[in-house]
Image (cartoon, rainbow, N blue to C red):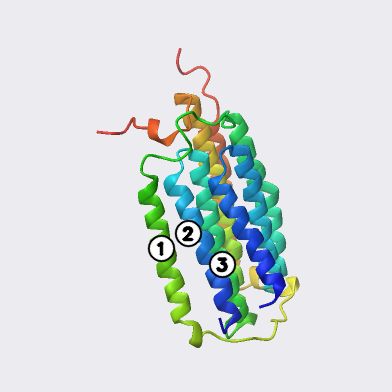
Amino acid sequence: MGVVFYLISALAVGGALAAVLLKKLVHCALALTLAFFGLALLFLQLDAQFAGFVQILVYVGAVAILVVFAILLTRGSEVPAEGVFSKTWLVGLVIAAGVFAVLAWAVLQAGPWLPTEAAAPAVTVNDIGHALMSRYVLPLQIIAVLLTAALLGAVIVAMHEKERTK
Amino acid sequence: MASPLSGYLLVAALIFAIGLAGALTRRNAILVLIGIELMLNAANLNLIAFWRYGPHPEALTGMMFAIFSIAVAAAEAAVGLGLVISIHRHTQTTDLEQMNRMKG
């Protein structure tokens, strides 16, 4: 639990807070990128190099750009006059605070039973590749099918229907 | 805070709660998707933290869970944003409080 952990956590939590609280959607997307980057650094801090770099590639590289594209395509950069929070924002805030209270209580209660310092696992990308190709090959194939279906579905859903109204 | 694991779990719980609050309180559909992405990321952080401090990290179970979860989240983001663009084309708005067509 060094200073580095607190700095990275502050980066991730601050980015998440800014992504939820800022008024302009483009600023929210940039803050979201910051939060993703902080989470990738937390993964690296946990000796999960592969997951950290996958996080940077997929989230900072692809999902953040996708969100920015969606904001620009829907003209979402204008701040609505009636405010950015819904009428029932207090209920949502209470629910979120309750969920955090329960989770934090559970973690703090479990504190003495959690494992203490463990040696960094010696897992290389080579091992991950072997596991993906042997033990986890069926989930890998299912994910491949899912990604193909999602790609086709996203294209079909967002495609412009030109001639149907005639 | 004796174990380093509890620090990571608390950060994950905080980010999850922030994402949930964003998904429940914002009016814009894209912001709701951003909140969902934050919640998924918090779950991934939990998986990686338990993998790192678990008894058998060489079995790679938590790591595989996190990687597959990242792939599913990417697919979900693509479909969700496609839906938002499609709804915007039909109704010219992304405000969730004006999307009440299916209201009885």
Q: Residues within 10 Å of mark 2 (few under 14, many from 20)?
A: many
Instruction: Indicate the chain on which mark 1 is placed.
Output: A
Is the Cβ of the residue at disc 2 closer than 8 Å to that at disc 3? no
The answer to whether tags 2 and 1 share a subunit is no
Identify the residue at image location x=45%, y=40%.
Answer: A85
Instruction: Indicate the chain on which mark 3 is placed.
Output: B
The spot of residue A42 in percent (x, y) is 66, 67
Which of the 4 image quarters holds residue B78?
Answer: top right
What is the quadrant of the N terminus of chain B in the image? bottom right
Marks 2 and 3, how far apart at CA: 10 Å
Decide if residue A69 is on the left or right side of residue B23.
right
Instruction: Name the amino acid, label 1.
Output: Val
Instruction: Name the amino acid, label 3.
Output: Val
Indicate the secondary structure of the residue bearing disc 1: helix
Kindly give the residue lying farthest to the left in the view shown. Answer: B104
Identify the residue at image location x=48%, y=32%.
Answer: B94
Residue marked by disc 3:
B11
Decide if residue A114 is on the left or right side of residue A89.
right
Q: What is the number of callouts on the image?
A: 3
Instruction: Name the amino acid, label 2.
Output: Ala
Decide if residue A129 is on the left or right side of residue A25.
right
The spot of residue A79 in percent (x, y) is 54, 31
Indicate the secondary structure of the residue bearing disc 3: helix
- Mark number for residue B17? 2
Is the Cβ of the residue at disc 2 closer than 8 Å to that at disc 1? yes
- Mark number for residue B60? none
What is the quadrant of the C terminus of chain B in the image? top left
Up-down relation of residue B9 to residue A21 (above or below): below
Residue marked by disc 1:
A99
The spot of residue B76 in percent (x, y) is 53, 49
Instruction: Indicate the chain on which mark 2 is placed.
Output: B
